[in-house]
Amino acid sequence: MTYCAGILVQDGLVMIADTRTNAGLDDISTFRKLHVFSWPGDRTFGLMTAGNLSITQSVVSILHEGLPNAETGEIDTLLGVGSMFRAAQLVGRAIRHVRESDGPALKDAGVKFEVTMLFGGQIKGQPMRLFMVYGAGNFIECGMDAPFLQIGEHKYGKPILDRAVTYKTHLYDALKVGLISMDSTMRSNLGVGLPIDLIVMRRDADEPELSRRIEAGEPYFHDLRERWSAALRAAHTAIPRPPYEPTPG
C-alpha cells in the first residue's frame, strides 16, 4: 500500500510520500516512491508513484532514459519538453509504453496493471503545475479550488487536507498539514509507513528548496504526532456530549 500527497499553494509545491511496499504480512520492504528530475536553472519535476512496483520502476527508468518518438525518430525526454502539459503527456506515454510491452505477460500471470502517479513542478518562466496521471496515461490537473492531489491509501488523510489547506496556505504550513495527513494515514493503515520522503519547491526557484527523508524517531515528526493526538483529545473533550441520553426514571 502507498500514500502520497501533492499540495500546490501560491508559494510553491509540497510532495510527500511514504516508502512502504508489501506483498504480504511477512514481506515488507522499503522503496523510494518520490523521484526528482532536476536541471537547476531550467526545470525541476517531482514524481510520486503508487501501484505495482515493477510497473512504476519501469516507468521511472523510461523517463530517465527517454522515450522513442515514432514520428520524429528522436528520443523524447523531460528535459526537452516545452511545457508542464507536455511533460505530463510524456509521463502518460511512458505508462502506456510499459502497458504495451509488459501488459500481456502480466495479464497471463494474473497480475493487474495498476499504476497511478502524481507529477508536478515547474519549467522556468512558466506556471507551476501538479497532475495526477492514471494507468491509461490520461491525467487531471490540480486547481486553486482543490489545491492538493493524493494517490494510494488517501481516505484517512483527505479530511485533514480538506479542512486545513487552501491555495493561500503558507508553504511550510502546507508541509505541516501534509505530515499530519501522513501520520493519520499511518495510524489507520499498517500498509503505509516510515521512512517518509518529501520535497518542497518554491515557485520560480531553480531547484528544490528542501529535500528530506524522515526516519523513525525524527524529533520534529515525533513531536508533531504527539501534539496532534493531544489536540484531538482536547477538542473531543471540549465538545459537549450529545443531548440525546435518556433521562433516568
Image (cartoon, rainbow, N blue to C red):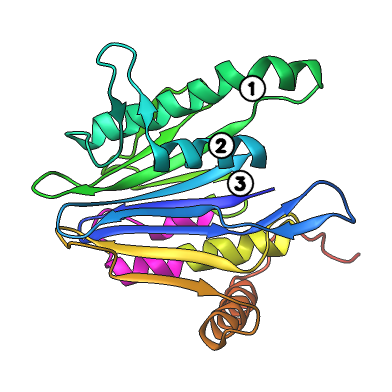
Labels 1 and 3: the sequence-earlier one: 1
Q: Residue furthest top?
A: 71
Q: Residue at x 45, y 28 (%)?
A: 94
Residue at 79 percent across and 15 percent down: it is 108
Left or right placement of residue 139 versus residue 248 in this view: left
Disc 1 or disc 3, which is closer to the eye? 1
Q: Residue at x 46, y 62 (%)?
A: 178
Q: Nearer the viewer, residue 119 or 207?
A: 207
User: Pointers 1 and 3 in contact (CB under 8 A)?
Assistant: no
Name the one closer to the observer, 41 or 199: 41
Q: Quadrant of residue 186?
A: bottom right
Which of pointers 1 and 2 lies earlier in the amino acid sequence? 2
Q: Residue 66: x, y in percent?
A: 37, 34
Determine the CA span between mark 1 and mark 2: 10 Å
Tags 1 and 2 in contact by the CB under 8 Å rule?
A: yes
Residue placed under numbered mark 2 in the picture: 58
* Mark 2 closeness class: few <14, some 14–19, many ≥20 residues within 10 Å: some
Mark 1 closeness class: few <14, some 14–19, many ≥20 residues within 10 Å: some
Residue assigned mark 1: 102
SS type, badge 2: helix
Residue type of the residue flagged with mark 2: Ser
Mark nearer the viewer, 2 or 3: 2
Q: Identity of the amino acid at label 1?
A: Asp
Residue 162 visible, this angle: no
Q: Viewer-proximal residue, 153 or 41?
A: 41
Q: What range of the chain is rendered magenta?
A: 159-177
Residue at the outermost left position:
125
Task: Indicate whether residue 141 is drawn in magenta.
Answer: no
* Residue that label 3 marks: 155
Distance, label 2 to label 3, CA atoms, is: 27 Å
First in sequence: mark 2 vs mark 3? 2
Q: Could you say whether the residue bearing mark 1 is in a helix, strand or loop?
A: helix
